[in-house]
Amino acid sequence: MGVRGQWRPTAVAGTVAVVCSLLAACSSTGSDGSTGDNAAISTSSSTPSDSAPAMTDPSSTDAASSTLSPEPTGVPGVDDEDEFCAAWARYSGTLQALGVASAFGDVTSVELARLEVVAAPALVDAAAAIDAAWPAELEAEHAAVVDDIIGPFERRAAKAIDALVAAGASPDDLAALEMAWLDALRTRSGDQPVIEVADMPDELAAIVDSAAEAFDAAMTPFAADPSLVTENVEAPATDVYLSEHCPDLASSGVGDAL
């Protein structure tokens, strides 16, 4: 998935690999970005020949049926000891959570805007942390990644923070939202398309709701925002660095070539 490891608004097919790694099953997606009701389930089967019928040991069948692994919980690497890796996990995990909710969560535009508003402080701080911890050996790709790949998402999140402040959010409120979002990333269920954020105090919830309404009215929807299309920006050295230094990100598709 390259250094982005993220939702690409106009390339629904390009996100299926990431989405399938986070969901138990994939909904079919139309060319207009709508999702179908049928789950795409990959199965493998073989038909035994007539001359050699397959023999099945009932005990082995029972054992096989009990070895299905549950979907993973939590976004890997959010609390990595390496600040650069942790910031990448928070950034890419946030974008994937928003992209999956948009594509498969059956949410309204206001409901998605609410998720964006709650996620905004964590996303902006993650972008700043990536910039601050940028490795010296990747200096040649610094501007391309920070400004051209991460930048559009950071700037959109900054507008969500502006909406929060206009709705009455204090610095403490923004910090509380960041903690709530990071906790949601840590406990995210792999088989749920919409990330669950813990309940918040009524006053803060009212601020979030007001900000979400304003943000939704002012902004192009997340999955349709052309400014978020960054797939033409190349940063191969950063891909390699993330793959070699941040192994927890591999399960999210970060650092892998698409």
Image (cartoon, rainbow, N blue to C red):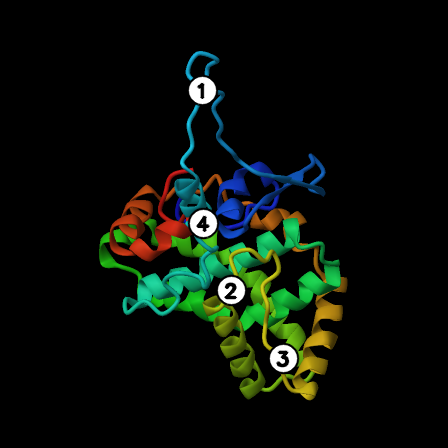
Classed neighbour count for the residue bearing mark 2: other residues with Cα under 10 Å, few (<14), some (14–19), many (≥20): many
- Mark 4 vs mark 3, CA separation in Å: 32 Å
Nearest the camera: 24 or 96? 24
Q: CA distance from mark 4 to mark 1?
A: 26 Å
Q: Nearer the viewer, mark 3 or mark 1?
A: 1
Q: Quadrant of the C terminus?
A: top left
| SS at circle 3 | loop
Q: Which residue is mark 1?
A: 53
In the image, 86 versus 198, the foreground residue is 198
Q: Amino acid at mark 4?
A: Leu
For badge 2, the amino acid type reads: Arg
The first of marks 3 and 2 along the sequence is: 2
Identify whether 232 is placed above or below 86. Answer: above
Residue 55 % position (x, y)? 42, 27
CA–CA distance between discs 4 and 2?
19 Å
Q: Nearer the viewer, mark 4 or mark 1?
A: 1
Residue found farthest to the left: 137
Secondary element at tag 1: loop
| Disc number placed over residue 188 in the picture, else none | 2
- What's the amino acid at mark 3? Asp
Q: Nearer the viewer, mark 4 or mark 2?
A: 4
Upstream in the sequence, badge 4 or badge 1? 1
The residue under label 4 is 68
120 sits to left or right of 136: right
Residue, disc 3: 199
Query: Which of the two labelled residues, at mark 3 and mark 1, occupies the earlier sequence position?
Result: 1
- Between 91 and 16, the one nearer to me in the picture: 16
Q: Mark 1 and mark 3 in contact (Cβ < 8 Å)?
A: no
The secondary element bearing badge 4 is classed as loop
Q: Are marks 4 and 1 in contact (CB under 8 Å)?
A: no
Q: Answer above or below: position of 94 versus 183.
A: above
> Pointer 2 and pointer 1: residues touching (CB < 8 Å)?
no
